[in-house]
Amino acid sequence: MSGRGAPVGSGDTSPGGTGAKADAKADAKALSPAPAGAVVVGASGGLGAAFVAALRARADVSTVLALSRSGPHDDGAAPEAGVVRARIDLTDEASIAAAAALARTLAPPRWVIVATGLLHAPDGLRPEKSLAMLDGARMARLFAVNATGPALVAKHFLPLMPREGRAVFAAVSARVGSISDNRLGGWYGYRASKAALNMLLRTAAIEWARTAREGVCVGLHPGTVDTALSRPFQAGVPEGRLFGADESAAKLLAVLDGLGPADSGRVFAWDGSEVPA
Ligand SMILES: NC(=O)c1ccc[n+]([C@@H]2O[C@H](COP(=O)([O-])OP(=O)(O)OC[C@H]3O[C@@H](n4cnc5c(N)ncnc54)[C@H](OP(=O)(O)O)[C@@H]3O)[C@@H](O)[C@H]2O)c1
């Protein structure tokens, strides 16, 4: 990590409008530019919902655009203070473009966090243990959600992010996407789609740096988190290493607060360590 200082108010991740939060907001107003927008893709998921809650509580964030496939969606009516909920399907680029059009009507986003992902599904999609289990259509589905989708989010949302000052685009990847760290094998489609995601993020980081010098575009490994995605695979997780979603999201936001432009294009774990390519 570059050791860049956290932005004003970044320590305030407490939910609700407390007096302390109001003070932090006042301080932030005095010392920094106007609070910016934030976007979370995958707000219906375990980690995505936790990111929405944590970003909403920050003094340096005014509005969170919470995007999800399964909802809830308010289509711009925003009944919840500070949160606008709308639809996105990463396999439908028109829906990503429509979500970006909605984002244009809100505060420019200094944060875009993609917390979508696919590992297994009720229709029989499950991680492959051997080559014999490979199925082209299922692999294509994993790549569409885990790699192509987040890249299309970058295509439509990076141009909306401020060119001046710090801006963070992060996509939740996974340690199993590390090629050099792959010692166990298996999980072909998920691993390969996360490795592809990491490459897409690095390539986007290089392009984005030409226009946004303080932009940080990274992948994240959240640890093993108690969500629907990990639930069938939690049996062997060591004691104390299964994180709650709120805990993981808070750790990842703290890691992001410490990153600078020199870190862009890399992948970082919940504890701040770099995940090797
Ligand atoms: N949990 C872990 O231990 C763990 C470990 C390493 C990495 N990760 C990564 O962390 C990220 C978040 O996963 P999670 O643990 O929070 O799992 P989760 O609760 O199952 O959330 C996954 C999210 O992905 C969304 N999604 C799937 N396909 C989509 C599509 N086509 N369009 C839009 N959204 C789509 C789901 O939306 P709908 O339900 O609305 O369809 C859901 O919100 C994933 O990238 C995952 O690979 C998780």
Image (cartoon, helix red, strand yellow):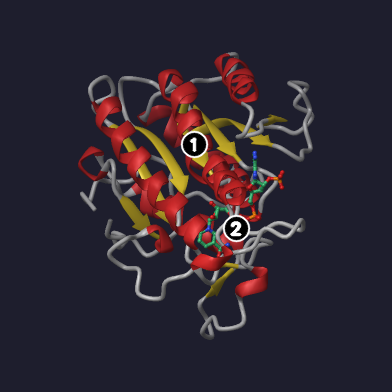
Badge 2: residue crowd in 10 Å (few <14, some 14–19, many ≥20): some
Badge 1: residue crowd in 10 Å (few <14, some 14–19, many ≥20): many
Numbered circle sitting on residue 148: 1
Provide the secondary structure element on which disc 2 rests: loop
Q: Where is residue 59 in the image (x, y as percent from the top left)?
A: 51, 38
Look at the numbered disc 2 and say if its residue's Cβ is closer than 8 Å to ligand 1.
yes
Q: Position of residue 119 (x, y in %)?
A: 60, 58
Residue at the spot of label 2: 119
Q: Tell me if I can see residue 198 in this picture.
A: yes
Q: Where is residue 254 in the image (x, y as percent from the top left)?
A: 41, 54
Q: Position of residue 226 (x, y in %)?
A: 63, 67
Numbered circle sitting on residue 256: none
Q: In which quarter of the image is the C terminus?
A: bottom left
From this view, report whether residue 114 is shown above or below residue 158: below
Provide the secondary structure element on which disc 1 rests: helix
Alpha-carbon span between mark 2 and mark 1: 15 Å
Give amino acid for label 1: Thr
